[in-house]
Structures are given as structure tokens and as C-alpha cells.
Image (tube, helix red, strand yellow):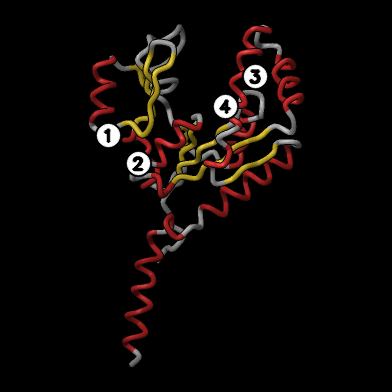
Amino acid sequence: MNTDQRRGLLIILSSPSGAGKSTLSKRLRAWDPDIRFSVSATTRDPRPGEVNGEDYHFMTEATFKRDVADGMMLEHAHVFGNFYGSPRRPVMSAIEDGHDVLFDVDWQGEQQIRNTDLGKHALSIFLLPPSIAELRARLEGRGQDSEEVIEKRMRKSWDEISRWSNYDYVLVNDDLDATEQRLLTIVASERLRREQQPAVVEHVRMLQAEFEGMS
């Protein structure tokens, strides 16, 4: 029996903007290219160059709301006039085939996923900056946002940071390489959880039958 067979994890990585989530997500998938990224569904129109099914699953508002009502969205939110969510079907298919799925969601999305029947397979990790001053410095150093946008992100950051205790693991990203190693250690260990190894149940039954056959 192949006891290496396992069920995939729902890896939820959250942080305030500037704490290193995007970089660590890329490094995690470089470490294991077999990790799938959960492609969100949205009711907004596609932007030039965006591909349906790769960038987003584009759908009508009626279809989106129907999927929510039918329990086919693991999490969803209404943002700036449009709906966004994580479709259940591709995630379920991936984890049953032994593939981990990476989610880029905030604390509200994390809680919604936790409250589904797939929540027992979730692994949630929150990234903290070493300081608020460093968080601002990172946002300014990216050179991508105006001062107004940076101020909005900074105001939002404390609301996000205050939810840290909802997560399974919390990492202070004071050194990117060291944080990466801690992240990889967590994922590798969580893959060995009893709930992630359905083949072990059958193996124990085989051991029981073998033991009873000795008597």
C-alpha cells in the first residue's frame, strides 16, 4: 500500500500590504510547483489581456449569487461594486488528487473557508511585519502607489494585523530567507497531519487483520 498518498491542503496566506505575502507565495510555489493557486471568480469585466480561467473565472452576477446560494463558493466578498470569491469545485478536485491549493485572501476569507466542510484541511498562516515603520518603508520602496494609496493601506493594516490570533501560524517577516524556511517547514509538517493521509486508515485496518490472523 502506498501510504505516501495524501489529501491536499488549503494553504491560506494572509498579511497586510507590504508584509511580503506575494514574494513568499512565489517562493512557496517555486519550492513545489505542484501547488495550485486558487483562481478567484469575479463579476467584473475582464481587463485587456486577462484570460478566463487563468486570471479569473469571469461570471455574471446572477451566476455568482446562485453559486453562493448553492454552497459552491468557499468564500466571497463584495468589493468596489463587484463580487469576488473562491469556487469550490476546482479546489475540491485538486485536494482529492493530492495537490495543495494556495489562497490569497484576507481574514474574512480565512474565516469563511474555515467554516466550510473543507475547513478541516485548511492551513492558515499570517505574516507580520517587524515594525509599522518598516511596513511603511516597504510600501514606499515599491514605488507602485501614490502617497494617498499608501496612507489607505496603512490605515487598513492595523485592522488586518489585529486578526492575527485567528490563524494557525504567525510569522514575523523580519528576514525574508529565514521566513521562507519557516514557511516551508510548516507546510511540510502539515502535510503529515492524520487528516491529510486517508491511506493510513486502510493501512491500520490491514495491520489489525494481520494481527488478528496471528491469534
- Sequence order check, earlier mark of 1 and 4: 1
Mark 4 and mark 3: span between their CA atoms?
10 Å
The quarter of the image holding the N terminus is bottom left
Dot 2 alpha-carbon crowd within 10 angstroms: few under 14, some 14 to 19, many 20 or more: some
Q: Amino acid at mark 3?
A: Met
Q: Are marks 1 and 2 in contact (CB under 8 Å)?
A: yes
Figure check: 35 above or below 42: below
Mark 1 and mark 4: span between their CA atoms?
28 Å
Q: Amino acid at mark 1?
A: Gly
Please tell me whether mark 1 sits on a helix, a strand or a loop. loop
The quarter of the image holding the C terminus is bottom left
Q: Is residue 132 left or right of residue 36?
A: right
Q: Quadrant of residue 17?
A: top right
Residue depicted at x 59% and y 38%: 28
Q: Which residue is mark 1?
A: 71
Q: Amino acid at mark 2?
A: Thr
